[in-house]
Image (cartoon, rainbow, N blue to C red):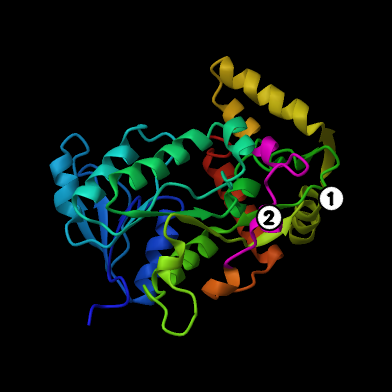
Amino acid sequence: MAPNHVSKVAIVGAGGSVGKYITEELVKAGKHQLTALTRPNSTNKIPTGVDIKHVDYEDPSTLVEALKGIEVLIITMAVTAPPDTQKKLIEAAAAANVNFVLYNSWGLAVEYTDLGKDTYIGPAQYAAREAIEKLGKSAWIGVTCGFWYEFSLGGSGLRYGFDFLSKSVTLYDEGTVPMNTSTWPQCGRAVAKLLALPLQSDNGGPCLNDFKNKSVFISSFKVSQTDMLESVERVTGEKWEVKYQPVKERYAEGVKELQSGNRDGFTKLLYSRAFYPNGGGDYEKDFGLHNDVLGLPVEDLDEATGAAVAMAKNDIADGRYGHY
């Protein structure tokens, strides 16, 4: 009888922002043989218990060789990665007969086509899905998790509007539009739980094949900027200065800045567009969540806010705040 679970998994970006947490959770679960694909000159630290294979993206044969026998490929890459990198990985996965590709999604629900178009992130995701389907060897799975909570709250005022240097927040419109957002650890748990599902279900329960060419929708919290502000003030014990800006004005500013060559404009337009009323940031209301299917824990908002505050303080001390 053929095995009913996947066992061999490869990940790109194992030492990166979300990849680190995915890798740690897969190692902790102990259900898979995990391989990290990395460039020979990479400085990212790979967790213990992971096999490392060096690849050369200019030599596709190294990718194919590294993926032979792999059943699931997980792709996590920064937006600054060369645009053809994912395409090369998808083609190599098909050549190596990889069954599933968790392509580089990790964010907004591009099922909302206007949101995908307005934020400029949709075309790359649609292209990845189309390429995987056209090659016909793998199935894609997207992971929709919203913006990463601690990164978006504690990393820069351009994201959720919180400036930890001035202790001020810019609320978009009235700051009451809710959106789904996920912590890095929740993203890691979601992938580990997903890949632990059986391929086929004998009792009507969830199985991995249910998610072929579909998205998994997860979330840590559904919160507004006002909810975040109340949490920040509870955690820090400080009152913050509150400013307001029309969300569509902020989006237009971001577009103009990006067109002028200022990359901060992309961050501004990306986040503000997700806070449009009924603009797609709250994907739970239309698509539901797979948290219960995957057995994900209910998280504590103030605990996650505390992690964001600590990140902001460390970045300020290191002179890195707002620079990534």
Q: Position of residue 79 (x, y in %)?
A: 45, 37
Mark 2 nearby-residue class (10 Å; few <14, some 14–19, many ≥20): few
> Magenta-highlighted stretch: main secondary structure?
loop
Q: Quadrant of residue 19?
A: bottom left
In the image, residue 250 sits, relative to residue 284, either above or below, namely above
Residue drawn where x is 38% and y is 75% of the image = 200
Q: Amino acid at mark 1?
A: Lys
Residue with the most extreme top position: 260
The boundaries of the magenta stretch are 271-290
Give the total of numbered labels: 2
In terms of depth relative to the viewer, which is nearer, 294 or 226? 294
Residue 133 lies, in percent from the top left, at 36, 47
Q: Residue at x 82, y 44 (%)?
A: 175
Q: Is residue 38 above or below residue 172?
A: below
Q: Above or below — where is 307 with respect to 79?
A: below
Q: Quadrant of the N terminus?
A: bottom left
Could you tell me which secondary element the residue under label 1 belongs to? loop
Residue carrying label 2: 286
Amino acid type of the residue that numbered disc 2 sits on in the rendered structure: Asp
Secondary structure at numbered mark 2: helix
**In terms of sequence position, does the residue under pointer 1 or pointer 2 come before the other?**
1
The quarter holding residue 41 reads: top left
- Reading the image, the residue beneath label 1 is 239
Q: Within the magenta stretch, is there residue 212?
A: no
Q: CA distance from mark 1 to mark 2?
A: 35 Å
Label 1 crowd (10 A; few <14 / some 14-19 / many >=20): few
Query: Horizontal placement of 123 versus 94: left or right?
Result: right
Verify whether residue 276 appears in magenta: yes
Asked if the residue under mark 2 is in contact with the one under mark 1, i.e. CB atoms within 8 Å, the reply is: no
Q: Residue at x 22, y 55 (%)?
A: 97
Residue at the (62%, 31%) spot, across then down: 118
For residue 275, say whether it is visible.
yes
